[in-house]
Image: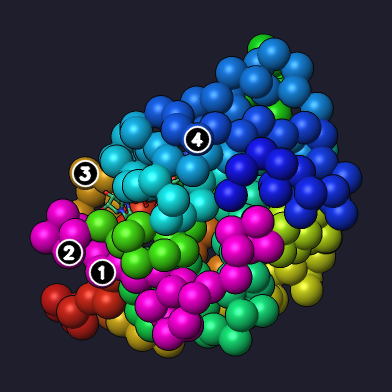
Amino acid sequence: MNEHSLKKALSKLNIGGLRYFDSIGSTNDEALAWATDNASDFSIVIADEQTRGRGRLNRAWFTPKGSALALSLILRQFPRPYLSRTVGLAALSIAESCSGLGLAPRIKWPNDILLSGKKTAGILIETVWSGEDIDSLVIGMGINVFKESVPPAESLQFPATCLEDELGRTPPPREEIVLNVLASLFRWRNHMDSNAFMKLWEEKLAFRGEQVQAITGNDAPLTGELLGLESDGGLRLCDAQGKSVIVRFGDVSLRPGTPSVSS
Ligand code: BT5
């Protein structure tokens, strides 16, 4: 993967601009700076290696050289009232590109893509403000492609995998994967307000109908059956008393949980 091969692959899309790096701290940092400096809509930052890749809450994201996709997309055009659906937009786009390879992705709400129950991709969305208004969004996506992209198991709380292991063969070139993810995102961003968008996002959710545990910051974990999505992208659980519980915080993490404690 290099600047030339990426430009060639992405020439089929109407992108705003492309910045490619052999190595960078974090593509999201570069995209945030570029967005502040008036980057065009649908501009993209891609790196072959990240030395300070970030997850949510400043957790580290592992992107060793030559093994993964680390990209950040700057969006200026998106339906402002549906801002909270943006993580679904990114998740669906990555999921669709995995489905296109014959895999069966699931979205672990809110921002992980699972294959065979293991994390293959993560999403980090950050916002650039202009006074009270949102100027633009940066959608960071990290996708594990080759074996070397999978962090050592002992460093993880949730198991990880990559496209190469899940396909059982050499995955397509990374340029092709980026093109598919971005083409899907380009299409769906004009339909973020639609029922079809919500339906597909909900259908792709991991653990539907199962007991899960949502950890929301310092509050006690919430346990319940995962029912689906609210229209704002919040997660709907049904607790042990049969009451609906909505989880909305961006830093929720979710794992198959133990059944509820009391009744
Ligand atoms: C995420 O955070 O999953 C968001 C990851 C976003 C990464 C992209 S890469 C391009 C752009 N530039 C950046 O600097 N970031 C974005 P979170 O849900 O907080 O998960 C982070 C956790 O995932 C870490 O604490 C590790 O346990 C685990 N992890 C780190 N690297 C991983 C990898 N390559 N594959 C699977 N899990 C990983």
Of marks 1 and 4, the one in the foreground: 4
Label 1 and label 2: CA atoms lie apart by 7 Å
Label 3 and label 1: CA atoms lie apart by 23 Å
Residue beneath the point at 54% across and 32% down: 21
Residue under numbered circle 3: 218
Q: Position of residue 179 (x, y in %)?
A: 72, 58
Span highlighted in magenta in the image: 152-177
250 on left or right of 263:
right
Q: Position of residue 55 (x, y in %)?
A: 37, 43
Q: Amino acid at mark 1?
A: Pro
* Helix, strand or loop under label 3: loop
Residue under numbered circle 1: 159
Q: Nearer the viewer, residue 225 or 23?
A: 23
Residue beneath the point at 21% across and 44% down: 218
Q: Position of residue 144 (x, y in %)?
A: 43, 61
* Helix, strand or loop under label 4: loop
Tell me which label, 1 or 4, sits earlier in the chain. Answer: 4
22 on left or right of 38:
left
